[in-house]
Image (spheres, coloured by chain):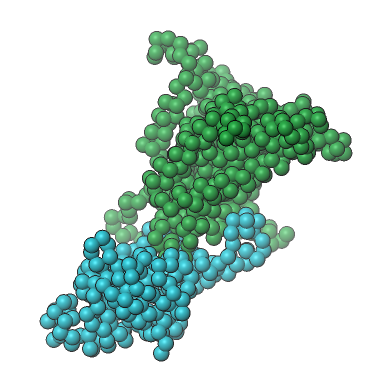
Amino acid sequence: MAAGLQAVRESAPALKRQTMPRAKRAAIVGIPAFLVLAFTGSMSLGLIMAALILAALYIPAWSALPAGKWVVLAGILLLAILYPIYQPNLFDVLVFGNFPSADTGVTMLVFIMMALGLNIVVGYAGLLDLGYVAFYAMGAYTVAWFASQHFSGVTVHVGGVGVAPSTPGFHISIWLVVIIAGVFATVAGVLIGFPTLRLRGDYLAIVTLGFGEIMPQIAVNGDNLFGRNITNGSQGINPIDPPGFGDRLHNAVGLPTDFLSSPNSTRLFYWTALFLVVVTAFCSARLRDSRLGRAWIAIREDETAAAAMGVPLMRTKTWAYAGGAFFGGVAGAYYGSFKGGTFPSDFYFNISVFILCMVILGGMGNIWGVIVGAAFLSYLNQEGLANIGAWMNANGVSDFVFRKQIDVPLYTSGIFGVILVLTMLFKPEGLIPSERRKQEFREGVHDQPLYDVTHE
Amino acid sequence: MADLLTAVGVRKEFGGLVAVNDVDFTIPERTIVSLIGPNGAGKTTFFNMLTGVYKPTAGQIVFDGHDVTGRPPHVVTKFGVGRTFQNIRLFQSMTALENVLVGMHSRLKGGILRAIFKPPSLKREEVAAREKAHDLLEFSGLRGRDDEYARNLSYGDQRRLEVARALATEPKLLLLDEPTAGMNPQETAEFTSFVAMLREEQGLTVLMIEHDMRVVMGISERVTVLDYGEKIAEGTPQEVQSDERVIEAYLGTAAVS
């Protein structure tokens, strides 16, 4: 305890020194934003509260304190956990309208999880995977097979909830299925990875692109695969059982029987997704800082040198692929259960590119960056663009610029393209790059002083 | 003295070009051997075959009792062959310490699950590895540079870091590909004594490709000369220096005087 106090006292000057510039930076952005909001009449108690919370998290240089970075982490986590509760009372943002609903939040979290998985493959190991959606599809079909009435020839119930015990088909608890899906996707990742990961750079990208194209084709045509109906074709498989804890746990400790029929349905889905994201982020961070993570970065930088230092290339790359596949599979399975169905149209190539955009926009290799990138793009896709469009149409912007009302979400792909191009032009390392990436993009710029001036 | 490495009839063809032509070669334990020859003589190709980067077209390479012919680089490294590169190939966006830690890869344990659950044994291993990497940097003349990005190190320090990283693989045989290229005379002298010390204190065997004849003649016990992929001479520095074919092919008449 005394030692702790001592440590706090010692770091106080550093805290003070680092806090001033942060306060200035916050003021430069915050005060004009505050004035604009005040004059446009969108000021509210909620807004002031939000500003104060953000300031408390950002302005003091928490990281200067011992265990300080946990303060920020805990703060952000708390805000995320409570989100579905305070979201209805939040203020409206100019142009963007209201904050995303908890329902949209679930989708955002699922995409964050997928982006974090892809980040292991692309951001850490530097393997350009254009067919990541294949693992998402595997997860989604695993949940469709093991928690629905699709295989009506059998009746197997292992902890399945939300269905009568006599319902035909596999009905296995979603918690189990999510893990099975992850393992299944991992195995598939290893099988796909083994022949393809010998390829480098562009060649790998082309082959993974191929796998990404094959996947929805199998899904569409899988209603008659060697005479069996595996995927139910383009109609997809639904309904899929919801997650839940069953009657026994419900009666004993009050856990929800099944999410779908619970009055808090959306919140339960949201919190579960948040839990999965936290686990994914934790695993990502642990892997990044491990022997394996170092080997991935070494391979990304220079395969030949990495091999000469004793890094087995194939095995290490396959691990990256398998790790990414696991989280993709889990995310796919959970999303399938949330949506209550699995459809081949969810797995087209553009989803792979969409997830890759999240990673690039946020900052490859940086967990926070990827989270922000994925949250932002999936929000735009789900709600944001529609809100912006509604605002533009209502306030005469559309009429002024395009001479008619427009349907903004129609142009989603084009808008994402523009965002990606702008990112590449102005911030190629992403919104929140890792220190490493910053180094890489600084290559060729040696801003050493012209004269060797030293201050005593 | 036992031979640490024996290469018999090693040959490498690229299409119709014979880069290394049936070379026999041995490295006795605890010696410093130099490989010299004009540019394009096949020295680096030979190096790459020893380390598993290239697969020999014919011939056999035995290192420390293991047949390493055509084995992948990470296996050869694990057996105890460490190397540096002719053009520096550090992991530029990693710090000096991290570069050395990558060098320790084959000496550390821990797969994907162990990394995620991080048991106490792994924590101890990491701490020990970092300490060792730190010591290795200090030993190689990079005191206080632990957290510098490799990219930001000076040229001489980058060369030193390459050696530190190679030493981290715990080699029995250290292969240095033109280690003093681009160094000034003082740095070269420092480096030469560093290599000599490695042999004396750590019992390392060293094979190096080198163009600086002062270095070659100064510290190597044996010199092998390649020209157009063929071994044209082998022996002590003095023997090689006075060999007619070597003078004609590489050293030139000035070197004799």
Q: Residue at x 40, y 71 (%)?
A: B69
Residue B200 spot, x, y in % from top left: 42, 86
Name the foreground residue: B172 vs A347. A347
- Whether residue B177 can be seen here: no
Query: Eyeballing the image, is A140 above or below B188?
Result: above
Is residue B87 shown left or right of residue A439?
Answer: left
Is residue B65 shown left or right of residue B176?
Answer: right
Q: Quadrant of residue A146?
A: top right
Q: Quadrant of residue B1?
A: bottom left
- Whether residue A154 can be seen here: yes
Query: Eyeballing the image, is B212 above or below A157?
Result: below
Residue A455 spot, x, y in % from top left: 38, 60
Residue at the extreme right of the image, as rendered: A252
Is residue A124 shown left or right of residue A187?
Answer: left
Residue A381 spot, x, y in % from top left: 52, 27
* Letter of the cyan chain: B
Name the foreground residue: A9 vs A421. A421
Q: Quadrant of residue A414?
A: top left
Q: Residue at x 41, y 30 (%)?
A: A417
Q: Residue at x 49, y 36 (%)?
A: A214
Residue A347 spot, x, y in % from top left: 53, 32
What tint does the image give chain A? green
Q: Residue at x 40, y 39 (%)?
A: A427
Residue at the extreme left of the image, as rendered: B253
Query: Eyeballing the image, is B216 above or below A158?
Result: below
